[in-house]
Amino acid sequence: PELVLVGTLELGALRVFALFERVVLKEMAQPSDVHVTPARFPPARQQVIAGQIARAAFALGLHHGPIEATCRVDGDDVVVLDVA
């Protein structure tokens, strides 16, 4: 699944407002994406995902302000696609 995290960085600490799961609706005439919250992951797994996104933001030099990030989850692997 693909996830979108929305939150803020406050002095390097990530505060998560929402974790959306991207779902593709194929039943419609044209397939469209819908963001669903809360994501269907247990809280402990969501914390691991948020931690990976926080590390990616830190690696990019981001430490304070609003953040939106997209990632994909495959088993135990979390792949951060973008951070803004």
Image (cartoon, rainbow, N blue to C red):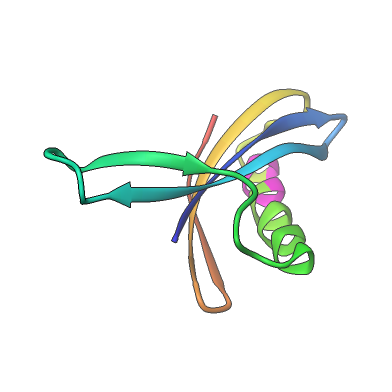
| Count of marks placed on residues | 0
Magenta segment: does it hold 77? no
Q: Residue furthest bottom?
A: 75
Q: Residue furthest left?
A: 29
Q: Is residue 74 above or below residue 66?
A: below
Q: Looking at the figure, which quarter contains the C terminus?
A: top right
13 left or right of 31 in image? right
53 left or right of 33 in image? right
Determine the residue positioned at 78% across, 24% down: 64
Q: Nearer the viewer, residue 13 or 1?
A: 1
Determine the residue positioned at 70% across, 42% down: 58
x and y, in percent, of residue 6 in the image: 64, 34
Determine the residue positioned at 75% across, 29% down: 8
Magenta segment: does it hold 57? yes
x and y, in percent, of residue 46 in the image: 71, 59
12 left or right of 56 in image? right
x and y, in percent, of residue 81 in the image: 44, 48
Determine the residue positioned at 72% across, 63% down: 48
Quadrant in the rendering for residue 61: top right
Q: Most prominent secondary structure in the magenta stretch?
A: helix
Q: Looking at the figure, which quarter contains the N terminus?
A: bottom left
Q: Nearer the viewer, residue 5 or 39?
A: 39
Q: Residue furthest top?
A: 65
Q: Is residue 13 above or below residue 67?
A: below
x and y, in percent, of residue 39 in the image: 60, 54
Please state the extent of the stretch shown in magenta in the rendering: 54-58
